[in-house]
Image (cartoon, rainbow, N blue to C red):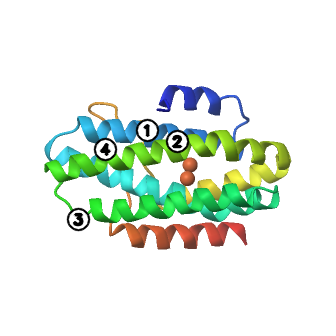
Amino acid sequence: MGDAAEDRAKAATYPEGDVLRVLYEQHARIRDLFAAVKAAGGDRRSETFAELRTLLAVHETAEEMVIRPATTAAGGKDVADARNHEEAEANEVLQRLEKLDPAGSDFESLLAELEASVDEHAEAEEHEEFPLIESSCDEGQRQAMGMHLRAAEAVAPTHPHPSTAGSTVAQYAVGPFASIIDRTRDAVRAAMH
Ligand SMILES: [Fe+2]
Ligand SMILES: [Fe+2]
């Protein structure tokens, strides 16, 4: 199981704006949000889950559009295909999850399943994919990719420390998961052109 503090420490080893820094920061926030959803009760749980769902939609969609082509170009087509497949599976689980009552036990068990698969997926990215990006993309490319990931985040500005008790209500994109993905695609496409 990966660790948010480790991801943040890793993020800090890359320059501001570098795609690897952005990716590790997003992984840390995803891990924090899983913990926050589990810890939250009542309305706070629905709200925190909406935030997690949004960040996952934004993160995975942007990775598919920005990172996978670079991984493929670096000779990692199999790695890219495996990661895209894992993301598609996680999207299906998320779409089942968003139909459930966050207070119910079905929700809890499906959330645990999703957390385990997202964790495994993120670890695979960090160990197999990010090193390919690091060794094959120069600084300029990495800054450009970082900017494209940030453009995707603009779809759904989330609170930087969502698990902080007493934090103001985070802003997150509303609407079904599929519509957040569509908006993310539009934002990334616009940033890439
Ligand atoms: Fe991913
Ligand atoms: Fe990722």
Q: Which residue is mark 4?
A: 112
The residue pinned by badge 2 equals 27
Which label is found at residue 97? none
Q: CA distance from mark 1 to mark 4?
A: 12 Å
Q: Which residue is mark 3?
A: 99
Q: Are marks 1 and 4 in contact (CB under 8 Å)?
A: no
> Residue 156, image x and y in percent?
45, 58
Residue kind at label 2, given as amino acid type: His
Q: CA distance from mark 3 to mark 2?
A: 24 Å
The three-letter code of the residue at mark 4 reads Ala
> Of callouts 1 and 3, which one flags the residue occurring earlier in the amino acid sequence?
1
Q: Badges 1 and 2: C-beta atoms under 8 Å apart?
A: yes
Residue kind at label 3, given as amino acid type: Lys
- As displayed, is residue 132 above or below residue 81? above
Q: Which mark is residue 31?
A: 1
Any atom of ligand 2 within 8 Å of the CB at mark 2? yes
- C-alpha distance separating marks 4 and 3: 16 Å
